Image (cartoon, grey):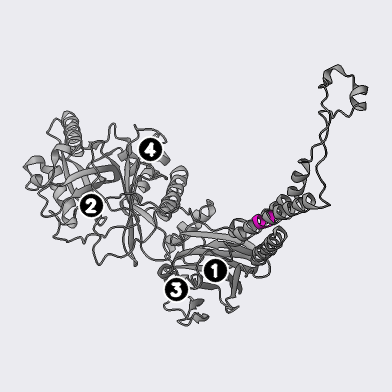
Amino acid sequence: MRFVWAVASFVIAAVLIAGGIAQRTVFLGPNTERAELGVSADQPYTMIDGEVFNKLPGVQTLQIVGNGQIFGAIAAKDDVAAWLADRSYNHVTLADDGTITSTVVAPAQEAPAVDESVQKGIDAATTAGLITPNAATPVGSDLWTDEFTSDDSMIRKLRLPDTMAVLVAADGQNPAPSDIALSWAIDNSTPWAGPLVVLGGIALIVGILLYVLGIRHMRRSRGPRRRGVPPLPETQPISVGELDADDAAGKGVISSGTKKRGGRRTFIAIPALVVSGALLSGCTADAWPKFDEPTATPSPTPTVIVPEDQETPSVTEQQAEKILDRIATTAAAADSSLSIDVASTRLSDAVLAARATNYTLRTTLPDIPALTAVPSKPYQIIVPEAKSGWPRTILAVWQDEADTTVAPRILIATQNDAWSPYKVSYLAQLEASAQTPNLAPAELGANLVRPDSSLLVMAPDQVAAAYSDVLDKGTASEFAPSFNLDVDTFLPKITAGRQEQLNTFNATAEGQTGTLEFAARAGASAPVALMTVDNGAIVAVNVEETETSKPTVADAVIKLDGNPKVTALTGVTQSQTGFQTTYSDQLFFFVPGQSSGEKIRLLGFSSDILKAEVLP
């Protein structure tokens, strides 16, 4: 009966092991599926929608074969379409029936005109080895969340959502590569192959044991049965220790080194273990079931109520950091070379105007320091505008984690259209005591507040004029109660500076031959207001302060003793008509919501000389 069970175990073992091996060999399906896109060969660009990549689940592999340079970029689908709006291109989409189709899209609008000054800046930046986004080439565009180049062939593993797209090109002028294919990894794991082999190995071992036991039983029960042997006569016990080796052998004494029969059983079991180990060694992780796959544990985050009509953020946090880092690199190069053309590719409005004056001064007065540098990553806070169209804005707050003595900085960067780069339009240092209001996380973004919005305690387009009045009149201003002057360090600094200048001027002119007057007004740069979580807004405004000195008698002159900046800007040391010096202030305020009961709070400021001129 033992032989019957042994044979049955061998049969079961063979079936189980063969089944496990067959799952990993004969019945193993393909691990990838490939699709050729079949695009036109005479178009300079090819746009592949995210739905095409998600035709099958899992990691997507993009394979491109061309002749020469290959350029690829990943961005939001709407951004890619906007960048391609002025040219024809291949558009690869996924039809409702799951078919991948490619069509040629005609230009939807004319190519944007490039201003001469803009082109001059692009040329200057290119000469300096910097990449400036523009409509002529896709390289370096701020729209791309990622971009990559290769020669002749390219293979990229991706995992894109439906809202994203891939742009493929050569150099933007020559036809894009047409040999484009997508492949997806298919799950061909066989989780029961390993267990089947293991069970087969166990059945094999059981069968071998049953076979050995059957052989043993058969040997013991073989041969004729005999009657019992009569008892031997009683003898005295023999001490083995009293015999030498020869006597012991002669008398039939068995030594302790005699080989035992039990070693044969171990020898018989070894083949089964070897066979099972060899089979298991060929089984990968895909041949076993997965019972302990980790699950994501959500971490608590602050609750932010997103308005129903709010769009998705214009850029991701990583994309924003990359953009700001490019701006910092370009601004640093411009500050070093004193090139306003290079600066104009990444700076605008009040920031660019202040730097133009600074570059002029540093050309003639080398000891004049550079203005506040545009910081590079990492940033503590990044809030992109939640908007799909243009213009679009980014607010960022930076602080040097290694050196706490360096003042934190806050900036606003704006992109005017799909082909233009982001440019910093406001840049200031945060006050040491400034408390940054609650801002939405980068993955949600925030809406801009209309300049004339009545939802705040003061409309953004009125803040500059109101604060200008406070600078001129102090607490006597009608707008002073709207501002929290207890935390404002800029106003006392301006007030003290004006009084000091007035005392010096009066001491020179003795109050009889000239006058010095101060005034503030809203600057030329438009305000920018980004909504906070608590229905307030961070508002950036531009204020221009003027100092006007005039003689009051016909033969009197105004001298510029001890004022090298005005001398360098005007080219004269004295005037019979007087001088006017203008300073540009970039101010960041927190303007609370209408129903909050709070006052407007100054967050940061920057003040730089803008121009100086001789009065007519």
Q: Secondary structure at mark 3?
A: loop
Q: Residue at x 6, y 47 (%)?
A: 478
Residue located beneath label 2 in the image: 539
- Residue 73 is left or right of residue 537, and the answer is right
Where residue 533 appears, as percent x and y from the top left, is 23, 53
Residue 256 part of the magenta segment: no
Which secondary structure dominates the residues rendered in magenta? helix
Q: Which residues are magenta?
A: 201-205
Q: Secondary structure at mark 4?
A: loop
Q: Amino acid at mark 3?
A: Ala
Query: Which residue occupies the extreme top position in the image?
Result: 242
Dot placed on the residue nearer the N-terminal end, 2 or 3:
3
Q: For the residue carrying disc 4, how many other residues have a C-alpha within 10 Å: few (<14), some (14-19), or many (20+)?
A: some
Q: Amino acid at mark 1?
A: Val
Dot placed on the residue nearer the N-terminal end, 4 or 2:
4
Q: Secondary structure at mark 1?
A: strand
Q: Amino acid at mark 4?
A: Asp
- Residue 24 is left or right of residue 535, and the answer is right
Q: Report the disc number at residue 111.
A: 3
Q: Secondary structure at mark 2?
A: strand
Q: Is residue 125 above or below residue 49?
A: above
Q: Residue at x 35, y 56 (%)?
A: 443
Report which quarter residue 604 is drawn in: top left
Which of pointers 4 and 3 indicates the residue nearer the eye? 4
Residue located beneath label 4 in the image: 400
Which of pointers 1 and 3 indicates the residue nearer the eye? 1
Where residue 347 appears, as percent x and y from the top left, is 38, 53
Residue located beneath label 1 in the image: 168
Which of pointers 2 and 3 indicates the residue nearer the eye? 2
Q: Is residue 93 above or below residue 245?
A: below
